[in-house]
Image (cartoon, rainbow, N blue to C red):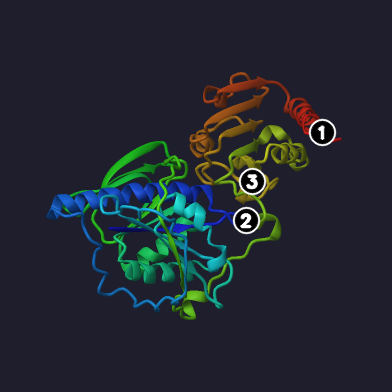
Amino acid sequence: MTVLCLVELDPDGGSADASLRALTFSRELAASEAQAGSAADGTAGSPAQPLADSPSPAPPATRTMSHRPAGNPHDVTSTGYVAAGVFAPETAVPAAALSAYGVTDAYAVESEQMTGYVPLAWARALAELVTLSSATAVVAAATDHGNEVLAHLAAMLGLPMAANCASAARTADGTYRIVRHRWAGSLLEDAVLDASPALLTVAVDAVAPATEPAPIVVHDFRPVLSDGDLAVRATESAERAGGVSLATARVVVGGGRGVGGPDGFGALEELAGLLGGVLGVSRVVTSQGWRPHEQQVGQTGTRISPELYLACGISGAIQHMAGCMSARHIVAVNTDPDAPILAHADYAVIGDLNQVIPALVTALRARAGLS
């Protein structure tokens, strides 16, 4: 049984944390598929036949780059296979990291026609890889890119897609038992998915990354793309492309109405930089036009799951809390001791953020030896 996982890369070229978690999810799913195959027919299972109406893939280039370590080969008869699709040149594939997370085959997907993020082209390439790898499931992190690409793939294959999954396992009858986040993570839904291949995205921070090394081979893969596949392209500014995304940041400094206006976010941005994090805001901030919508945290913004969420001048409306419930630690800075967010915070500072934040920035700069 083979599970194909879309792996996104960070700006520095490494595997995104959300994708490492998706690979861990994929490995567990592949193991359940192998076990289900054994239960169904008394064997360890074999890759499913490709869909009859799936597009025919272009043959991959004969050149491969081997990263299989010396010694006994990885036993996948009982754990299944995990393949990775990486939209980057072969030389840019983080093979060592993928091998550490159990990937046996990585496909470096590239095309002279495909530069940057091209969602339809990415989906078309995955559709071809489904056939090439005989994948029984396709997995991606539930990031903006992951959800969009798998939605396009679902439309191309005429199959359902289950988004924001926390767990999934194949049963002996060939269906998938899944648990997924609903209502911005405020509840968990048990469901059964009957589709082949299964298309799943993994809720951010729902699965802890865990390594399980396997030998890997990297293949150069060039998909066949039409003009329609290339019609829509997404571009990012140098500023956004070079930083950590709000959805995957390990530290988020949030600002709300209490910041007072657009000029008040300078100190919060500096604090986020000193902590290696990013800036997030509440809905009222974007509604007032103080900051762009792309920085909004909440049910109608971005759902975050950092190690630390420092919420400054944010009251904690239900819609906002739906977007930050997965934060490991919440620290609130607020003048109102009865603000709703304090009921969810691990720590709270009751005080004026215009005094607290500059003092914190000064202390961090001194600790880092900055003038």
The crowd level at tag 3 (other Cα within 10 Å; few <14, some 14-19, many 20+) is some
- Determine the secondary structure under disc 3: helix
Image x and y of residue 338, in percent: 59, 19
Measured Cα–Cα span from mark 1 to mark 2 = 27 Å
Q: Quadrant of the N terminus?
A: bottom left
Residue in view at x 61 percent, y 51 percent: 294
Label annotation for residue 162? none
What residue is disc 1 on? 369
**Left or right of 58, for residue 306:** right
Residue in view at x 63 percent, y 32 percent: 310
In the image, residue 165 sits, relative to residue 125, either above or below, namely above
> What residue type is disc 1 on?
Gly
What residue is disc 2 on? 11
Of tags 1 and 2, the one toward the viewer is: 1
Q: Quadrant of the C terminus?
A: top right
Of tags 3 and 2, the one toward the viewer is: 2
Label count reads: 3
